[in-house]
Image (tube, rainbow, N blue to C red):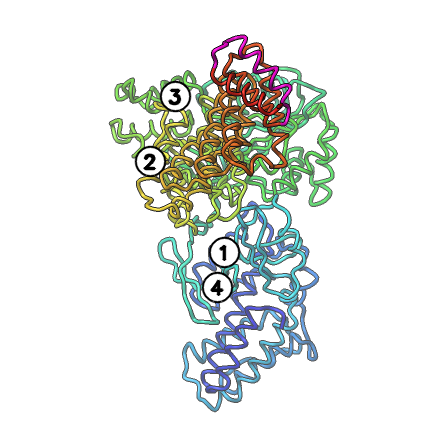
Amino acid sequence: MNYIPFQRMQSRIEISKSDSDLGYFYDLLLYGEYITKTIALYLVATINEDSDRTQYRLEHSLVRANAVGDFSKAIEDIVIGPAAQQISSAIRDYELNELTKRAKKGDWQYKAQELLVESLYVFGIEQETLPTKSPLRKWFHLFTFLRNKTKGHGAPKVECCSIACPKIEESIQLIIENFSAFSRSWVHLHRNLNGKYRVSKLTENASEFDYLKREVTHNYENGIYVFLDHPRRIKLYHTNAELTDFWITNGNLKKDLYEAISYISDERMNQSAQGFLQPVTKLPSSHTEGDSQLEVKNNCLTNLPKPPDFYVNRNELESELNRILLQKDRYPIVTLLGKGGVGKTSLALNSITKLTETNRFELIIWFSARDIDLLIDGPKQVQTKVLNIEDIAKEYCNLLDMRLKGNEAVQYFSDEMTKNRFGIALYVFDNFETVTNPIEVFEWINTHIRNPNKVLITSRISRNFKADYPIEILGMTEDECRELIEKTAFELNIEHLLSKKYIDDLIIESDGHPYIIKILLGEVAKKGKAATIKRIVADQEQILSALFKRTFNTLSPAAKRVFLTLCSWNSMIPLIAVEAVLWRPENEKMDVQVAIEELRQSSFIDVINKSGDDIINVPLAATLFGKAELEVYPEKIKVDADKKLLMEFGATSYSNLSSGLVRNIERKFRAISNRISSVEQFEQELPILEYIASRYPKTYEYIIQVYEEYNDYEKVKYYVREYLKSNIVFSKKEELWLKLADICKYTDDWDGESHALIELIQLPNVELNKISDVANRINNHIYYNYDAKTNEYKRELLSIIIDVLKSKISQCNAIDLSRLGWLLLNNNRPQEAEEVVKRGLSIDQDNVYCQRLLNKLEKTTR
């Protein structure tokens, strides 16, 4: 047996087999239930997404299913019902054929059914004779019948169980060993913070997933997957990266949770049903969906939807978009990128409607993949018009009244993108992130589109593909916000409720987001008063989810982790602080800088540069969304730990940005000093502080101060040297070399002291008096330490300082020259020493130091 979950279940069967026949029988029934549910969910995963939401309809039903018969019916619906048309071609010659083939005696499918029929007879349960040919799909009906007539509504006798059990087990084994699904690659995927995946194999061979261990460009939710034409997630089926147990849906849906059961351990757990709460009835069309027929509008043939009722011109963006669309020889693909509700669709519609008045395009086709309309009274789910390449091609052919299907339609539209028979064409793909496989669809478009034809894409996602010309749509400018507020307030008749301060706060707190502004004004109209903005936004959970959830789901694990950490504390945060805290050894390794850039491109954060320092701001709506996501985030404890460390940097806001990063770092060190009582405790903080110091060297001053307080001078010397390695001004280096020399002297470290002194005097523009003092220190050391007179490096050391002093000899006074003379004498150059000291006496004939050296030289030469 190749499939780990069933291996574990078989181990349970072996134990119960040796325990009692009745326990053996009941566990076999659980085994059959497990197989039925697994196959049903597997078949659901093989369904390709379509505009009728076939896959969702089945998931919606199975998450509520409280009986195994519901899963048996789902299998029937999938393999012989309307859903069969949407099944992946990858299983048509295998699993689908195995389930629908009219099997005969000698076929394993037939034998599996025959054994169940025999088991029914053992229990005296009447059952129609098995036909001479019968498809495997009937097995699930037979099993459900057996289960319900015995365990469900009966009291099976032990002796009957002992006869029936081997037959039931053999029947189950025939399916496990022969059904093609269980010979495919099954894995559990867990995406690490570095973007690569931990691939835990449920089957012995899962090599198709190996690329996910190496590559970071893929985005799959954590969960169980099987590889068909590509990895397909088995929803409602759960395990963990360690494969400790396996849980499968067991109904009992209450509010937004459903029960999952482990047939291996009998453990039950609740899982979120948030993704399965929307109704399955046919949804209304989006108000931005293109018309179903082409019409002449000004100089174009088009299916453009109706422009918004009122629109605030965004002149800079419109001008840029218009300029690029008018170009005939460059940029065949243009994308409008931005968060949900920021106005991408409105901008596109307004600009393209104006373009119909020109002669640039003869044909403009609008394709809508929108699944949610953002209305002023809240987000409403709508029917998605196109989801994949086939849907797009089919929609185009329908507009042209051409009855082409499948590959013929795809080829026809592919050719039309290259050269359209109506003339120059513009193809607009609205809400591109909603299509089933954006990368695949984009590559198809990119392959076939040719100038002067153009493609315009609106999307919340920017990192999965690169357009020829991306235009980022951010929040409105202040003037645009004020115009939007004025128009909306007039429409809602609430002008009298809005004070100047409330309007100012509304612009700041909304971050210029037009949809959030409209929602907030809508709440003012509902309540008849201007309530606290933050409270209104916090109450709009459904709206926050509509704006951010889809884009959030596409973020890399590292970006999610960084975003939730930022949202955990309601303050602007220095970028360097975020990097330092998240890169500490206790956290899983991640590229924080890449994650922050991903968040910025996805419009979750703003990065403000003030006085050369980058400060991260998370807009109010994004913050509140993030706080809600954090409550169910598996690593919430780690985020809370990071939050505590971030808080020690102190709060930052627009009002105190000008004080810079220094204040934040000082606060951090004060907080650390207040909670540590030993150098060992301080060193637990060092990874964060060292990272900050690597980017902001002044931090080393605080680290040095702490070690000085604990009299750990070896560490003081180490961090002074680290500080010196950084890019700091010469005046600071002069101060640090002198400090290092003093500390080395205090710790009897002549090698360190002499090195520091020599480095000090070689700095540019160092003052003569400091060079002279260094000469004096070196001479004194040699005078008082006999060993220093014979050190091999003495000659080189003395030569360096002699050369430096000689280069300034014209500025030297008698004392300076006496010190130079002593250096020359110590370096065994007495004649030069005599010349220098005589020069000093010519400046000051009474200088005692020069006289003393001259006497020494005269005695030496006698």
Q: How crowded is mark 1: few (under 14 residues within 10 Å), some or many (20 or more)?
A: many
User: How far is disc 2 from disc 1 in space, using C-alphas?
Assistant: 55 Å
For the residues bearing labels 3 and 4, Cβ distance under 8 angstroms: no
Residue named by callout 2: 670
The residue type indicated by label 3 comes to Ser
Disc 4 to disc 1, C-alpha distance: 13 Å
| Residue 461 image point, x, y percent | 55, 36
Please say whether residue 381 is visible from this viewpoint: no
Instruction: Say what amino acid the circle numbered 1 marks.
Output: Glu
Task: Say what amino acid the circle numbered 2 marks.
Answer: Arg
Numbered disc total: 4
Quick check: marks 4 and 2 in contact, CB under 8 Å? no
Which percent across, then down, holds residue 592? 51, 39
Which circle's residue, 2 or 1, is located before the other in the chain? 1
Q: Is residue 239 left or right of residue 94?
A: left
Residue to which mark 3 is pinned:
658
The amino acid beneath tag 4 is Ile
Circle nearer the viewer, 4 or 2 = 2
At 46% from the left and 86% from the top, the residue drawn is 19
Q: Residue at x 58, y 40 (%)?
A: 386
| Residue marked by disc 4 | 248
Mark linked to residue 854: none
Question: Are circles 2 and 3 on residues that touch, CB within 8 Å?
Answer: no
Q: Toward the viewer: 512 or 80?
A: 512
Instruction: Please report contact status of discs 2 and 1: CB closer than 8 Å, yes or no.
Output: no
The region drawn magenta spans: 828-847
Q: Majority secondary structure of the magenta segment?
A: helix
Give the Cα separation between the discs numbered 4 and 2. 51 Å
Q: Does the magenta stretch include residue 835?
A: yes
